[in-house]
Amino acid sequence: MITLYTDAATNPKTKVSACGVLIIENNQQQQLKFSLPTGDNHESEFRAAIKGFEALIYQYMIPSEKTVRFYTDSQLLADSIQKRYAKHYQSLLDDLLGLQDQFAFVLTQWVPEKQNQGAHHLALQELHSQE
């Protein structure tokens, strides 16, 4: 089983955004960080999840054999995945669901921010490197 944590950070003044991705499998940890297009924090959370699943697909040649436990501290993102609907972010959600559908099973779970510190710190590092 693969464990995936993602988080986004957005500067509210400049709308500059970044994300952190933490992948854990077999007690091995991979830390990734990416800049994101400018946008609001909710949009950036969707883009962070997309980056995380793109990284997994790139890493695993046959994702259909993998199960993913996905953690996010965005309640909107977790709820949207569960409902398969996002009023203002449907195109991003559709992209994300298309990526998730390539895996055998994806369990999405909301966690409090304090339980998502690894991805959170990576996102902040990348955000600060852009400013």
Image (cartoon, grey):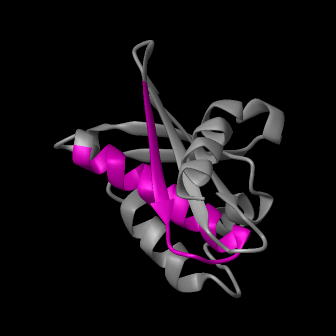
- Residue 75 appears left or right of 96: right
Magenta-highlighted residues:
30-58
Residue 118 lies, in percent from the top left, at 63, 31
Q: Where is residue 48 in the image (x, y as percent from the top left)?
A: 54, 58
Name the residue: 34% across, 48% down: 55
Looking at the image, residue 14 lies above or below residue 109: below
The residue at 58%/83% (across/down) is 90
Q: In which quarter of the image is the N terminus?
A: top left
Q: Residue at the left extreme? A: 61
Q: In this view, does 41 lie to the left or right of 104?
A: right
- Judge whether residue 88 is colored magenta: no
The residue at the far top in this view is 27
Q: In which quarter of the image is residue 81?
A: bottom right
Q: Position of residue 66 (x, y in %)?
A: 33, 37
Secondary structure that dominates the magenta span: helix
121 is higher (above) or lower (below) than 44: above
| Quarter of the view holding residue 119 | top right
- Residue at (50% x, 66% y) in the render: 36
Can the viewer see residue 60? Answer: yes
Instruction: Judge whether 3 appears above or below 94 on screen.
Output: above
- Determine the residue positioned at 58% across, 66% down: 46
Q: Is residue 103 visible?
A: no
Q: In the image, residue 91 lies at what x, y percent?
A: 51, 84
Q: In which quarter of the image is residue 107?
A: top right
Q: Nearer the viewer, residue 36 or 116?
A: 36
Looking at the rendering, in which quadrant would you find the C terminus? bottom right
Furthest residue in direction front, as rendered? 131
Q: Does the magenta stretch include residue 37?
A: yes
123 or 63: nearer the viewer: 123
Question: 75 or 68: which is nearer to us?
Answer: 75
